[in-house]
Image (spheres, helix red, strand yellow):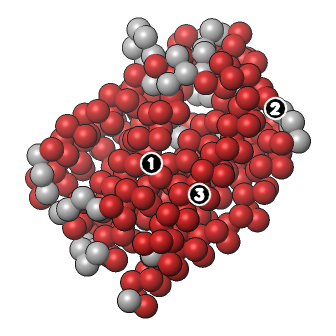
Amino acid sequence: MRSTTRVWLDGARPRTLPASVTPVLVGTAVAYAEGGFVWWRALLALVVALALQVGCNYANDYSDGVRGTDEHRVGPARLVGSGTARPRTVLLAAFACFTVAAVTGLVLALVTTPWLLAVGVFAIAAAWFYTGGARPYGYRALGEISVFVFFGVVPVVGTSYVQTGALSWLAFWCSLPVAFLVVDLLVVNNLRDIGSDEAAGKRTLAVVLGDRGTRILYATLLVLACAGTVVVVVLRPWAAVALLTLPVAWLPLRRVVRQETGQRLVLALRDTGRLELAYGLLLCAGILLSTAAS
């Protein structure tokens, strides 16, 4: 039997955590390039991002579990759906994470601008109502839009902002390829679960598009991430080093284009997370090299 600690770590879905780490790293690199790097604010931004995502993962585990959506899932067993943890315990864990994100975000708001409080409220609401509430938008093919905004654009631009005190076009353009890769994490996850989600009445975008359409979407988002990188290169030429991740992109892409299913797509999810992290690290390096060369 797995230890309690291991069970809860698995429930946090560590394969997906690059979705919260990468945007903060990129936003911090932008802040440094624009002369506003503040290490402790960057650290707090990372705490907010991680707490928000882990809270979202636990909230989804709870909501899908009590609805019965996870009873016949293909991927790793969930805490509630598998009966490993009580629903109320998982719910409390989700709200504990949201509380950490809210308190940490409040500190950042106090040292920057009160407007961050509104952003935080919307982010937490988006995390909860993805699968929670009476009419979860994740069951209506809207999850990708929310992930693009709150796990792509907002954390990159927001991390830069809390350090520099100003909105940045560089941060915005850098956020787009990062957002496309974050969305691909959700796309490949939902591609794996098309059968069980459809049977449970969960109409994700993958269910709406079907198997072939979802695989095309996955590849399209990779192309858009590359195109977005080209725009960043115009602003910071050394950002081109981020394109060295193209060979890494082939690892999950080949599983998708080869029509792999089930547990094979768990590996594609893992590799997509690694791709996003590798891309983010190289993009950060490119931004810093361009700054040093200027």
Q: In which quarter of the view is residue 135 placed?
A: top left
Q: Nearer the viewer, mark 3 or mark 1?
A: 3
Q: Which secondary structure lies at badge 1? A: helix
Cα gap from disc 2 to disc 3, whole angstroms: 30 Å
Picture coordinates of residue 74, whole percent (x, y): 76, 27
Quadrant (top left, top right, bottom left, bottom right) of the C terminus:
bottom left
Amino acid type indicated by mark 1: Gly
Q: Earlier in the sequence, mark 1 or mark 2?
A: 1
Determine crowd level at label 3: few under 14, some 14-19, many 20+ residues with C-alpha closer than 10 A.
Answer: few
For residue 262, the mark is: 2
Cα gap from disc 1 to disc 2, whole angstroms: 27 Å
Picture coordinates of residue 46, whole percent (x, y): 37, 57
**177 vs 182: above or below:** below
Q: Are marks 1 and 2 in contact (CB under 8 Å)?
A: no
For residue 152, the mark is: 1
Which of these two is toward me, 114 or 51? 114
Picture coordinates of residue 269, whole percent (x, y): 69, 44
- 62 sits left or right of 164 in the view: right
**Residue at left 83%, top 42%?**
257
Which of these two is toward me, 193 or 59? 193
Q: In which quarter of the view is residue 25 placed?
A: bottom left
Amino acid type indicated by mark 3: Ala
Picture coordinates of residue 277, whole percent (x, y): 58, 61
For residue 227, the mark is: 3
Q: Are marks 2 and 3 in contact (CB under 8 Å)?
A: no
Q: Which secondary structure lies at badge 3? A: helix
**Residue at left 59%, top 57%?**
227
Q: Earlier in the sequence, mark 3 or mark 1?
A: 1
Cα gap from disc 3 to disc 1, whole angstroms: 16 Å
Q: How many marks?
A: 3
In this orientation, does residue 188 appear?
Answer: no
